[in-house]
Image: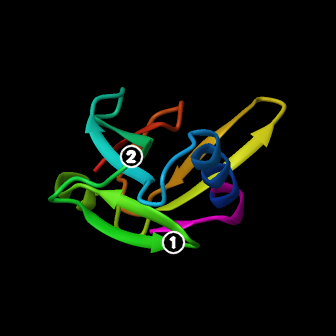
Amino acid sequence: MTLTNAATEKVRDFIENFEATENAGLRVSVLPGGCSGFQYGLNIEETSEPDDEIFELQGIKIFIDAFSSQYLDGIEIDYTSSMMGQGFVFNNPSATGGCGCGSSFTA
């Protein structure tokens, strides 16, 4: 998994605004749902869960549960801003399909 510089800056902003402790990190998850079967989730959390995989990217702690881990290998998370809107974008080489909204995928 990688975070682009734009995504890293935005996550750092969220963590600072959340007034999180030094144990806080970004939870990256995959949840059943969306129009293609799975959707991504991002949350700032104070601590990890006991069964989480924990690692650090560009100084940001990343928390991933066992279910989500199988779908996130090689994913790149970016943050874009344009006249059409702004938000996180997931570039997942393991996805076999997706939908027009870009927030759900098929594996």
Disc 1, SS: strand
Q: Number of marks in the image?
A: 2
Query: Left or right: where does residue 19 sit relative to residue 25?
Result: right
Residue at horizontal 41 percent and vertical 59 percent from the top: 23
Q: Nearer the viewer, residue 44 or 71?
A: 44
From this viewpoint, which residue is outermost toward the right?
Answer: 83
Vertical order, 51 against 20 (above or below): below
Specify the color scheme: rainbow
Rendering coords of residue 83 (x, y %): 84, 31
Disc 2, SS: strand
What kind of residue is marked 2? Gly
Query: Left or right: where does residue 79 sit relative to residue 47?
Result: right
Vertical order, 35 against 4 (above or below): above
Residue at horizontal 38 percent and vertical 50 percent from the top: 27
Query: Left or right: where does residue 66 sit relative to residue 7?
Result: left
In the image, which residues are magenta?
1-7
How many angstroms separate mark 2 from mark 1 (CA)?
Answer: 27 Å
Mark 1 closeness class: few <14, some 14–19, many ≥20 residues within 10 Å: few
Which disc, if any, is residue 57?
1
What kind of residue is marked 1? Leu
Residue at horizontal 64 percent and vertical 40 percent from the top: 17
Residue occupied by mark 2: 97
Residue 15 falls inside the magenta stretch: no
Q: Earlier in the sequence, mark 2 or mark 1?
A: 1
